[in-house]
Image: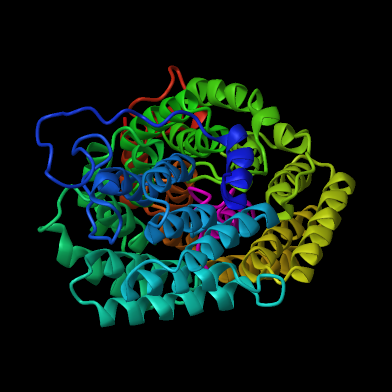
Amino acid sequence: MRPLWMVIAALALGVAVSPVVTAGQPPGQHDHGTPSGRLGTVHVDTSCAPAVQKEFDRGLALLHSFWFSAAIESFTTVLKGDPRCVMAHWGIAMSWWGNPFAGFRSPAALNAGLLAIDAAKASGAGTDREKAYVAAVELLFRDASTVDQRARTVAYEKAMEALAASHPADIEARIFYALALDQTALPTDKTYANQLKAAGILEQEVTRQPEHPGLAHYIIHSFDVAALAPRALDAARRYAKIAPDAAHALHMPSHTFTRVGSWQESIDTNLASAAAARKDNATSEELHAMDYQVYAYLQTAQDTAARRTVDASSALGAKVQTAGAGNAAPPQAGYYALAAIPARYALERDAWGEAAALIPRQTPFAWADAVTHFARALGAARSGNPAAARQDIDRLAALRDALHKTNDVYWTEQVEIQRRAATAWLTLAEGRQAEALTLMREAADREDATDKAAVTPGPIKPARELLGDMLLQLNRPAEALVEFETTLKKEPNRFRATYGAARAAEAAGQGQKASAHYASLLQISKSADQPGRRELGEARQSRR
C-alpha cells in the first residue's frame, strides 16, 4: 500500500505535472549528477541506495531551477527504488514549499509538505546531517496556522546556517543557506546585507561548479535589485545555457536584463521561457514570462508585438489554478500577470481611456486585483472622469485593508503606494495642485523605500516617473527633469522616463541634455514599430 503522503501528492500532481524531460547522454556527461547542458550538473552525497543516486541528483537539479512538479516526480521515483531515502522526502517537502520568493502557500501545499516531513521522520533512516536537513525544512511548514510565515522563514534560515557551519564539506548546505538569506532579505533594507552575504557564498563556488544551476540562479536573485543588478549579468547569460530544458532557467535571466534595461535580451529569453512553459502546460510560468516580455516590448515601442502578447495572455486566464506544486511561478504570479499585462499596455502608451476601461477580475489575491483598479483609477483621473477614479481608489483602499488584516506587510504597502499615486492625480484633476504634489511625492518616497517583488518586472507605473509627469504638467520642467533622471537611475532605459526627461530638459532650456535623452530614446527604440509612436517623431525632429 502506498504511503498517504504519496497518495495526496499524486492526486495534486495529476493536474500540475507533465512528464519529466528525458536526460539523454550529451557530451560532457559527468560520473555523478544530472547531464550538463540540459538541467545542469548537481551532485550531493546521501545515504540513499547507490542505484537511486542519479535520479536523486536529477530531482535536486530540477529543484534548483524551481521546476517543482518534475522534482517531486524524480524524488518519488527515488523512493520507489529506496523507500528509506530520507533526502528524497526532504526534496519533496522543499518542492511543496515552492518558490521561496512567493508569498502565499496554500493549505494543501503546506499539508503535503508536512506529510513528506513526517514520512522522513517516521522512517528512522538517514545520517545526522540528513536529519538536520529535514529538521530545517520542517520549520517552514510546522505550526503554519499559529506562527507567521516571516518567523518561520527566518527560523529556517538560522537552521540552514547552523547546518552549513556544522558540515563545511556540504556545498549544497551552503547553497541552500544562501538562498534562505535571499528569501528573508527585507525589501526595506537598502544595505542589501543578506543579498551580498548570499552572493559571497555562491560566487566562491562558481569556479568549481560552473554548470551548477542553483549557483547561477541564486546569484541572479541575490543581485535582483537596481543597485546590484549589473553584477548578475554573467550569471544571467550563463543560466539559460546551463539548464535550457527548465522554463524558469530561460526566464530568470530577464530579471537581470530588466534591471539593466537590456530589453532585447529580455524579450528573447522570455519568448523561449514562455514556449518551454507552454510545452509543459505550466500556465502561470508562461504568463510570468509574458509579463516580463510585454514590459520589454513596450519599453522598445514594439507595440504590435505587445498587443499580440496581451491578446495571447487573456486566453490563458481560465487555465490558472491555485492547487498543486508546479513550476517557479505560483498561481498568484499567473493572476498578477493577467492583470499587469493589459494594464502595462495601456499605461506605457499613455492610453488613459483604455486604462480606465480595463475590466477588473476577482481572484484569491488582493494585491493582483489591485493592479487593474490602480490602472483604471489613474486612467480615469487623467482622462476627465474623476467620479470613476474615486470608485477605483475606494476599491484600492478596501484591498489594502484586506491585505493588512492578513498581516501581508509588503503588499499592503504596495497597494497603499498605488492608492496614493492615483489619489494624487485625482486631486490634481480636481484643481488642488499643492495637495496633489504632496501626495505624489509621498507615494514616490514610499516606493523608493521598498523594492519590487520577484513576481513583477517593475511597478505598473513608477511613482517617481508619475511625479515627473505631474511636475511637467504643472510647468515645472527643471524639477520634473530631476524626477525623471532619478527614475532612470533605478529603472534604466525606461521609454516614458527617458521621453519625459527629454521633454523636461527641452522645456527647461537645457538643450544639450534634451538632445542626449532624445538620442537615448531613439537608441532604446531602434526596433520600434514604424512609423511608431508620436514621441519618436518628436525625438527625430529634435535631432535635425
Looking at the picture, how far across and down is residue 214, in whole percent?
Answer: 30, 54
Q: Is residue 136 above or below residue 108?
A: below
The residue positioned farthest toward the top in the image shown: 530
Q: Nearer the viewer, residue 502 or 192?
A: 192
Q: Is residue 535 left or right of residue 107?
A: left
Quadrant in which the N terminus appears: top right
The residue positioned farthest toward the front in the image shown: 1
Looking at the picture, how far across and down is residue 516, in whole percent?
Answer: 31, 46
Q: Is residue 523 left or right of residue 114?
A: left
Q: Is residue 96 above or below residue 136?
A: above
Q: Is residue 455 magenta?
A: yes
Quadrant in which the C terminus appears: top left
Q: Is residue 71 left or right of residue 54?
A: right
- Residue that appears at 61% across and 22% down: 311
- Residue that appears at 53% across and 27% down: 281
Q: Nearer the viewer, residue 237 or 476?
A: 237
Looking at the picture, how far across and down is residue 111, in whole percent?
Answer: 65, 58
Q: In the picture, residue 411 is in which quadrant?
A: bottom right
Q: Is residue 352 above or below residue 220?
A: above
User: Which span of residues is magenta-colored?
Assistant: 449-477
Looking at the picture, how far across and down is residue 242, in whole percent?
Answer: 23, 41
